[in-house]
Each structure stands twice: as C-alpha cells, then as structure tokens.
Image: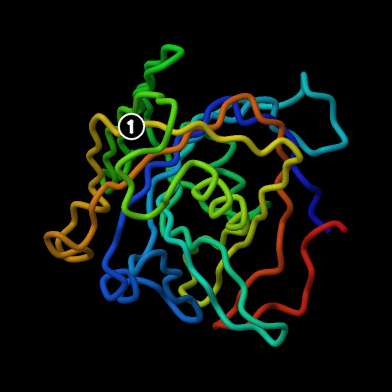
Amino acid sequence: MLPMLAGEIERRILVNYRVDPAAAAKILPAPFRPQTVNGFAVAGICLIRLGSMRPRTLPAWAGLRSENAAHRIAVEWDTPAGIKTGVFIPRRDSNSRTNVAVGGRLYPGEHHRAQFDVSETPTELRVGYSSGDGVTHVQVAVRLQDELVGSGLFEDTATASAFFEAGSVGFSATRDANRFDGLQLVTSSWTVEPAEITSVRSSFFEDATRFPRGSAEPDCALVMRNVPVAWRPLERLHGGQESSAPLSNA
C-alpha cells in the first residue's frame, strides 16, 4: 500500500470560474459530469506551495518544498454507493523534479515541469508560471479582503469554504485515457480567506476550443495559508469504474 504524505500548505490560491455546464461537460471524460452551483459549473486553478512534504512516518525536516498548480473542474459521478463529488484535474504542473519524476509512476498524479514566478505580501499574492512543454501559461494576482463579494457562485465565504472542503477528493488525467489517479486532501485545520481577483490569465480557460467566448468567467478567489495537511492515495478509476485494488492506507 502507498503511504500517506504529510506536509503543510504554505500558500494555496483557488481562483474560481463560473462555467457553462455544457462547455464543462464536453471536456469531462466518463464517468464525470459537472457539479453545478446556481446553474453554473465550477472550475478553476489551484496554485499551491507545499512545504515539508514527505511520507507521514518521516520527520518534517526530511520533507520537500515545491510550487504546484492544477486546473480543476468540480464534478460528480455515480457509484454503487451513490453519487460522489470531487474535482477532475486535467492538468498538473510543478517546479519540483521529484513531483514530475514520481507522479503517476510511484505515486498518484502526473505532473508537468514548469517554472514559477511568485511575489507575495501579507495582503497581495501574485503567481505566474509557464510549463516546459509550452502548453500552459498562467498569471494570477489576488488581494485579500474581509468578505467574499461579487461572486455569482457563492453567497459568502462560509458557503464557498464548505463547497471546496467537501470537494477534497481529486482524480487526475493520466497518459492512459481510461485511468484516473486519485488523491484526497485531509486536514483538521481547514480555513480559507476571501480574496479579490485583480488579474488572471490562463491559457486553459482562454482556449476557445475548450471554452467558447463567454462560457468561462472568473468569479472569486480563496486563499489558504499555513495549513497542515496529508494526502491519502485513493483507488484508481478505470474506464468509469472504481478499481477493486485499494492503494491507500486506512
């Protein structure tokens, strides 16, 4: 069985988009379908700096630090036990050679190599990156605020926080179109701060072949900082069915 990984979210920015559910459905593989809020699909970019990441049995000083990104779409899917919810991740990027080397091979989650440019103050965060294969380019700037305002998805910070906390399960695309690698984020200290999106550019969401003009609009941002976490490997999904071979520790 694969071990759980432990570490710290030093900084996580969730930049969220309101998306036409029909546009989201076209790019989702089976068995996933868009999870909707107020008539919109919910998608976005997760920009996360992880610190002290290591197998849970090792001390924190042995862990690694890395900048990572994931494009995500909130999804639901049917199982014999009922409907499950989480996120589908069509693309992961990282500045860590270790993450790229082991992701999808020794541990769930294939990553692409990328270079990141980060600038942070206590109230303003800027993260940009470009992938080495030239496919993905992102530039994001957010400013912390007291309340979540102007969102078409969520009434307030608490509602947004609860939605994303419930979506802690993520399945990632792999080189095999019929296999999805799964991870679950686990923390006893879930906290988010609302933020205003001051600028955002994403080659993924600006690709008109995926999202026709007007079908994906920036909505809101949330920030997490200094949160202890663990990642639990999940059973893979194969061809729309959950594998019978467990990969995770209890």
Residue 133 x, y percent position in the rendering: 31, 45
Query: Taking 187 as reference, is 70 left or right?
Result: left
Label 1: element kind: strand
Query: Taking 227 as reference, is 126 left or right?
Result: left
Image vertical order of residue 16 relative to residue 194, above or below: below
Image vertical order of residue 240 relative to residue 120, above or below: below
Q: Quadrant of residue 156?
A: top left
**Mark 1 — residue?**
196
- Which residue appears at 44% of the width and 41% of the height? 14
- Which residue appears at 71% of the width and 37% of the height? 229
Residue 127 x, y percent position in the rendering: 36, 27
In the rendered image, the quadrant that contains the C terminus is: bottom right
Which residue is at the far top?
121
In the rendered image, the quadrant that contains the N terminus is: bottom right
- Which residue appears at 52% of the width and 73% of the height? 76
Q: Nearer the viewer, residue 55 or 144?
A: 144
Which residue is at the far left?
213
